[in-house]
Image: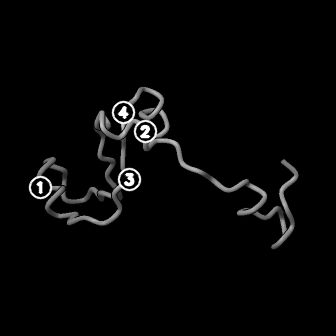
């Protein structure tokens, strides 16, 4: 859902820490339902356009394949 939102130009943030009972009250959820996570959605500010590009390390610098330290074959 987060990737699909980004593809449509919508920003998102996965939220894993919240007051579950308060959220259940807000959305009128049955008592036996569990709220596991939330996703906040919104349009990014026009002022953040230049901040989208991050300098990232190559996958081979941050990942291992099958065993620790073995560089991925990608």
Q: Which of the pair 10/4 is nearer the observer?
A: 10
The answer to whether 46 is drawn above or below residue 32 in the figure is: above
Q: Which of the pair 68/38 is nearer the observer?
A: 68
Q: CA distance from mark 1 to mark 3?
A: 20 Å
Which of the marked residues, 1 or 2, is nearer the chain's N terminus?
1
Instruction: Determine which residue is flagged by label 4.
Output: 10
Q: CA distance from mark 3 to mark 4?
A: 13 Å
Disc 2: CA contacts within 10 A as few (<14), some (14-19) or many (>=20): few
Residue 7 shown left or right of residue 33 in the figure: right
Q: CA distance from mark 2 to mark 4?
A: 16 Å
Q: Residue sitting at 30 percent across and 40 percent down?
A: 41
The N terminus appears in which quarter of the rendering?
top left
Residue 44 shown left or right of residue 6 in the figure: left
Circle number at residue 25: 1
Circle number at residue 50: 2
3 vs 4, front mark: 4
Instruction: Determine which residue is flagged by label 3.
Output: 14
Which of the marked residues, 4 or 1, is nearer the chain's N terminus?
4
1 vs 3, front mark: 3
Circle number at residue 36: none
Residue 30 shown left or right of residue 33 in the figure: left
Q: Residue sitting at 16 percent across and 47 percent down?
A: 27
Q: Which of the pair 52/62 is nearer the observer?
A: 52
Q: Residue furthest bottom?
A: 68
Which of the marked residues, 2 or 4, is nearer the chain's N terminus?
4
């Amino acid at each position: 859902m987060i990737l699909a939102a980004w593809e449509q130009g919508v920003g998102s943030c996965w939220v894993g820490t919240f007051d579950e009972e308060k959220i259940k009250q807000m959305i009128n959820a049955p008592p036996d339902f569990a709220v596991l996570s939330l996703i906040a959605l919104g349009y990014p500010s026009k002022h953040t356009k230049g901040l989208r590009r991050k300098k990232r390390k190559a996958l081979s610098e941050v990942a291992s394949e099958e065993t620790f330290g073995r560089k991925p074959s990608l």
